[in-house]
Image (cartoon, rainbow, N blue to C red):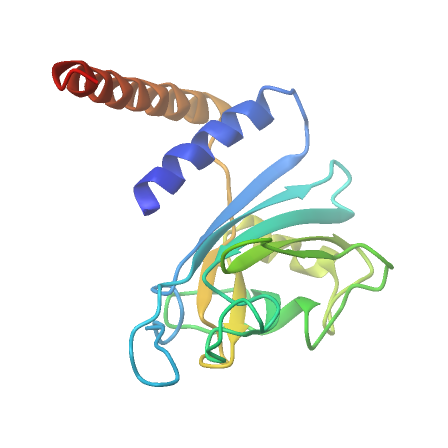
């Protein structure tokens, strides 16, 4: 559920920032609703299939010469064999960017990391790890400064830093994109700490409520 993903992601960011790293962090929450047009996943037989979703975190190094990322995606078939239906098969995945990006605008591919175009020129930078069980996987990579789909990381930094970029994953059913997430800078450290503290309080209250219910039932 998106609320729980947001809480857990905030807590992860608190831990990352607590390390004192100076690199700039960005993140994306990938959903069907952000695609243009919005995606409604179905089976090839016409019935519904689980909604796909995911999240990604990005790190720009201090010199702004490289951006690493790790994305985890659920309910998109990373191998073509995780489900019997072909509709959810992953075909390509990219980072898109343009000077202006809106919910109704599809920006061009600026760096491809799965399928075509594949713009990573450094061997072993991109690592694709399908889930051992379940549907989906994790993919990570590194966009180095000279790389790009007819562009470079340096040329796209203004778009990335201003929130005018997104990451998306395409499938057989949705060749123009099934899930998308805007790449945005993380909030200020103080804001994240407050969010994390609030999230911890919510989780603590949920645990105490669950504990009281268990005791009342005599478990």
Name the residue at 34% across, 64% down. 33
Name the one closer to the observer, 214 or 142: 214
Name the one closer to the observer, 17 or 74: 74
**Is 128 placed above or below 93 here?**
above
Place residue 32 in its image quadrant: bottom left
Picture coordinates of residue 165, whole percent (x, y): 54, 59
Horizontal placement of 54 versus 124: left or right?
Answer: left
Name the residue at 31% across, 84% down. 46
Picture coordinates of residue 56, whole percent (x, y): 54, 49
Place residue 38 in its image quadrant: bottom left
Horizontal placement of 76 versus 119: left or right?
Answer: left
Picture coordinates of residue 120, whole percent (x, y): 78, 63
Q: Which quadrant does the C terminus fall into?
A: top left
**Is 155 placed above or below 217 here?**
below
Picture coordinates of residue 132, whole percent (x, y): 60, 53
- Outermost bottom residue: 45
Name the residue at 22% across, 22% down. 210
């Amino acid at each position: 559920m998106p609320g729980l993903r947001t809480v857990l992601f905030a807590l992860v960011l608190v831990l990352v920032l607590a390390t004192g790293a100076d690199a700039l962090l960005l993140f994306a929450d990938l959903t069907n609703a952000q695609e243009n047009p919005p995606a409604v996943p179905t089976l090839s037989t016409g019935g519904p299939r689980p909604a796909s979703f995911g999240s990604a975190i990005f790190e720009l190094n201090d010199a702004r010469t490289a951006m690493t990322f790790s994305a985890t995606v659920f309910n998109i078939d990373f191998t073509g064999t995780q489900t019997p239906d072909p509709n959810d098969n992953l075909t390509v995945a990219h980072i898109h960017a343009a000077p202006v990006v809106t919910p109704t605008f599809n920006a061009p591919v600026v760096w491809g990391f799965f399928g075509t175009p594949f713009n990573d020129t450094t061997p072993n930078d991109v690592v694709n790890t399908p889930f051992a069980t379940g549907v989906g996987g994790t993919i990570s990579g590194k966009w180095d400064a000279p790389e790009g789909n007819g562009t470079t990381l340096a040329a796209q930094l203004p778009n990335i830093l201003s929130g005018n970029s997104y990451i998306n994953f395409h499938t057989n059913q949705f060749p123009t994109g099934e899930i998308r997430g805007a790449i945005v800078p993380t909030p200020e450290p103080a804001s994240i700490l407050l969010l994390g503290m609030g999230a911890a309080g919510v989780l603590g209250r949920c645990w105490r409520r669950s504990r009281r219910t268990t005791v009342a039932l005599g478990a």
